Amino acid sequence: MLIKGHFFPKQENAEKIKLFIRRHIITYAPWVLFIVLLVILPWIIIGTLNSIDISISTLLNSAQINPDEKLVNQVIIVLLTGYYLFISAYFFLMWIDFYLDIIIVTPEHLINIQQIGLLNHKVSEQSLLRVQDVTSRVDGFWQTFFRYGTVVAETAGDEPNFLMRDVPNPNSVANIILKLHEELIESGGLKEELGESVGLNRPKPVVRKRKEMINKIVYNLPPNRGIDSQKLTISKKTNTQKPEDTIELEDSKVVVIQTPKLTRKITKDSKISKEKPKIKKIETSQPKLEIVDIEPSWISSAQKDRRFKKSKEIDRSIREGELKEGKEIRL
Amino acid sequence: MIDLIRKYNRMFYTIICLIIVFIILSIILQSSLFLFILYTCFIVIYIFYSYFWLKQINTYGYTGDWCRPVMWIYYIVSIAIIITSIIFLILV
């Protein structure tokens, strides 16, 4: 049931209607012509029978039935009444089908209202955010002549496309829908909804954060990335953007090895013994440690393989005591 | 029309058959009773149809549009058909 002032059941109060579209009136014309033909058809038949001097009574008499003329006339009147009532019902059924088939475009929604027969009423609503592409199509002579056609709004996911048949000025309608779609995306309040609904920006924050973190670690290293680093700036994982969160490790020697998957625990007071500058000997004084996961997600598989081999080589070197202070490691 | 008949073919053919049976009965029995029943059936069905038609228009029709003039046309056409038929039946 429609609320007064509302054009579709779920219309919000502030939701203005941008387009209110019915099928082109010319699509109703064939039905009107058909109905006119049905109206005059009985008179054509009666006129034809009279012109060849055959009456209904004659026909009935020839069928060995002998009704009086009054009854025959009554039969004709009753039949004609039923016939015209049927035509009237059919005409207005077609009209209601035409009149209540509506497409409504609001700044946020596409609404397709369909009247199917007399008693079936269907309202489908689609968010404009889900529209991916809008196509307009004008086919054939009549559509070109009367400027109407089909508009298809393709939607994201498994939801069915929005098909609008016999729409007047389909190109303008498609343009307006696209424009409204773009306006809706550009409006700030709905960006998050779009991200959630379409799934565009879900993985981005994690990846960006990780990239920023790794870049910071890598680029704050001295140019030779060596184990002779006297200063190393490591940002906290949680607040990578703020400069005050960076930690300076004074007088300590830290080896940062970038491997496909390597986790190191480093704190402000992390120290590596000068005598034994092995990674295994990282000393931590605080129980709460910052975990820095150095795993660049954008590197190619070949690079990953190479780095993995290199890390194995470094591990072997550490095990065998070959890796000593001052030795440069290139990854 | 063909679509409509195809959609409701069973009901449609049943109604046609009933109409034919009533007419044949009235002719054979030389009685207007069956014609009167048939006529009443037409009117009753049409009134039911009109009720639902108007209900749909009142429920889903849009004010300020051209549904009101069409409703008036509907009233006029329906009443014209019924009154004309009654007049003709009285006259014959």
Image: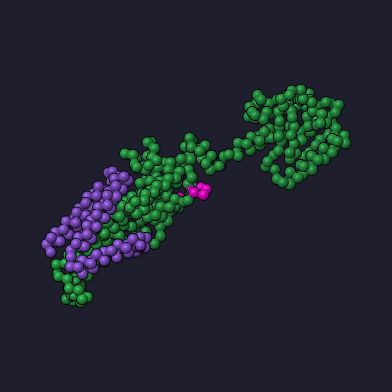
Chain colours: A green, B purple
Residue A30, above or below A101: below
- The answer to whether residue A37 is left or right of residue A283 is left
Residue A36 seen from this side? no
Q: Of A304 and A215, which appears nearest the observer?
A: A304
Q: Where is the N terminus of chain B found, in terms of image quarters?
A: bottom left
Q: Position of residue A161 (x, y in %)?
A: 47, 51
The image quarter containing residue B78 is bottom left
Residue B30, above or below A200: below
Please state the total of marks drawn on the protein image.
0
Q: Which residues are magenta?
A: A153-159
Q: Where is the C terminus of chain B found, in terms of image quarters?
A: bottom left
The image quarter containing residue A282 is top right
Residue A280 seen from this side? yes
A158 inside magenta stretch: yes
- The answer to whether residue A254 is left or right of residue A39 is right
Residue A61, above or below A153: below
- The answer to whether residue A223 is left or right of residue A109 is right
The residue sitting at the left extreme is B91
Q: Of A274 and A265, which appears nearest the observer?
A: A265
